[in-house]
Amino acid sequence: MKIHFKGKEYDLSKADDVSAFTARLDEIEAASATVAAAVATAHTERDQALARADASDAALKKAETDFASRLDSGIAARVDLHTSATRVLGGDYDPKAKTDREIMIDVVRADDENFTGKDPAGAERSADYVRARFDAVVEKDVRVDSIGNAPRVARQVREGATTRTDGVPDVEKSHAEMVEANRNAWQKPAPGAN
């Protein structure tokens, strides 16, 4: 019996052809095993690469989220600082190109014109100290550009003065007068009614 295999004819009735045919089958089987091992290795490497890519993608997404969160909180903090500074220093105050510390020192100077952010020995005050002084001034909520002679008024506020000497109407007093007028308005006859 003769067979054709891979472009060659084998006569299976001859021992030499049978040996050659089985050797050829062994070669093909070995080559097939080598290819299967290479495919398995390639699959393993592919899976490892996919796992690394997925991990990198997750890390990138986390980094993007963290960055966006830090950016948002940084922007919110800067806007809050600017709002507080503007409330104290007035709408003309320009904090551009200033650090947060410089802005806080400017605000504290509205209350204490000699404040430099340094202690008497000339060493820089801590960030916590400057922040605490800033917060104390902002809590007073004195807007220095809305009143005349700001340093004098700021000093009066520090010293606990209760009367205004700058010609600006006292807001609390005006409010109390308005409330009292409205409270008693029902006792007065309406215009045109007799």
Image (cartoon, grey):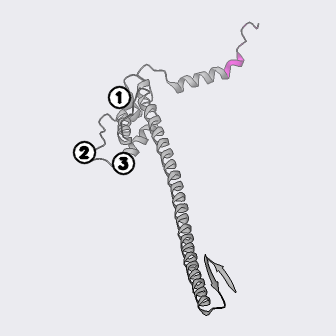
Magenta region: 183-194
Q: Decide: marks 2, 1 in contact (CB < 8 A)?
A: no
Circle 2 residue: 120
Q: Is residue 60 left or right of residue 193?
A: left
Mark positioned earlier in the residue sequence (3 or 2): 2
**On screen, 81 above or below 146?**
below
Image coordinates of residue 68 in percent, x first then y, are 51, 48
The residue identified by callout 3 is 127
159 relative to 72 in the view: left or right: left
Residue located farthest toward the right when viewing the structure as drawn: 194
Quadrant including the C terminus? top right
Q: How many marks?
A: 3
Can you say whether 55 is above or below 28 in the image? above
Name the foreground residue: 154 vs 176: 154
Bin the neighbour count of mark 2 within 10 Å (Cα to Cα): few under 14, some 14-19, many 20 and up.
few
* Amino acid residing under circle 1: Pro
Q: State the residue at coordinates (60%, 83%).
A: 25
